[in-house]
Amino acid sequence: MALLNYTTSIAPEKTVAEIQAKLAKAGAFQILHEYRRGTGELIGLSFRIETEFGNMAFELPARIEAVEAVLQKQFPRGKVKREQAVRVSWRILKDWVEAQLAIVETGMVSLEQVMLPFAQNEQGQTLFEALAQKRFAGLLTEGSRHE
């Protein structure tokens, strides 16, 4: 099965604007763009939002290289252009943000629940990164491979 949005022709700037609008509607009061040094390629968004616990920051990385690798694997005959991987990365992220915000809007979950892996501490490290650094200590169940 081909990767979601693999045929998109929508410019990443348009997609990022759509994501920003969704985040703002959900209550984000600050949105930061992250660009790759030297190339100016947009590689991520971070945002701050007021939660019932106070202001929290979240990171939304585009992970363009990962998408590019999947596209190269799925379409080995034709050279996949970097620009297409950028467009696809941002469309996938937009779809994910829309889905997460939709279940938040219904009250099925809180924003903190769905965005928790991407919550950033004061040093900018995400919760996922912090847990991975500790090899998910305290979360592994009996019978895990690395006991």
Image: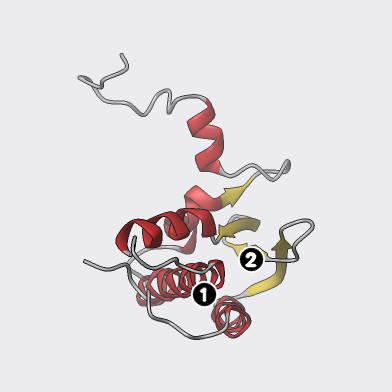
Distance from the alpha carbon under mark 2 to that under mark 1 = 26 Å
Q: Quadrant of residue 105?
A: bottom left
Task: Identify residue for label 1.
Answer: 87
Is residue 39 visible in the rendered image? The answer is yes
Mark 2 = which residue? Answer: 49
The percent coordinates of residue 35 (x first, y second) are: 72, 62
On the image, the x and y values in percent for residue 80 come to 45, 67
Which quadrant is home to the C terminus? top left
Name the residue: 34% across, 60% down.
76
Residue that appears at 69% across and 66% down = 41
Above or below, 14 against 58 in this view is below
What residue occupies the far right of the structure in this picture? 38
Query: Looking at numbered disc 1 in the image, what kind of residue is underneath it?
Result: Arg
Q: How many marks?
A: 2
Indicate left or right for 108 with 25 as reference.
left
Per the image, label 2 sits on a secondary structure element best described as strand
Residue 29 vs residue 78, the one in the foreground: 78
Residue at image coords 79%, 58%:
38
How far across and down, in percent of the image, does residue 54 sit?
Answer: 65, 57
| Colour setup of the view | secondary structure
Q: Quadrant of residue 21?
A: bottom right
Q: At which x and y percent is residue 4? A: 33, 71
Nearest to the observer: residue 9 or residue 74? 74
Residue drawn at x 43%, y 28% as measured from the top left = 136
Q: Amino acid at mark 2?
A: Ile
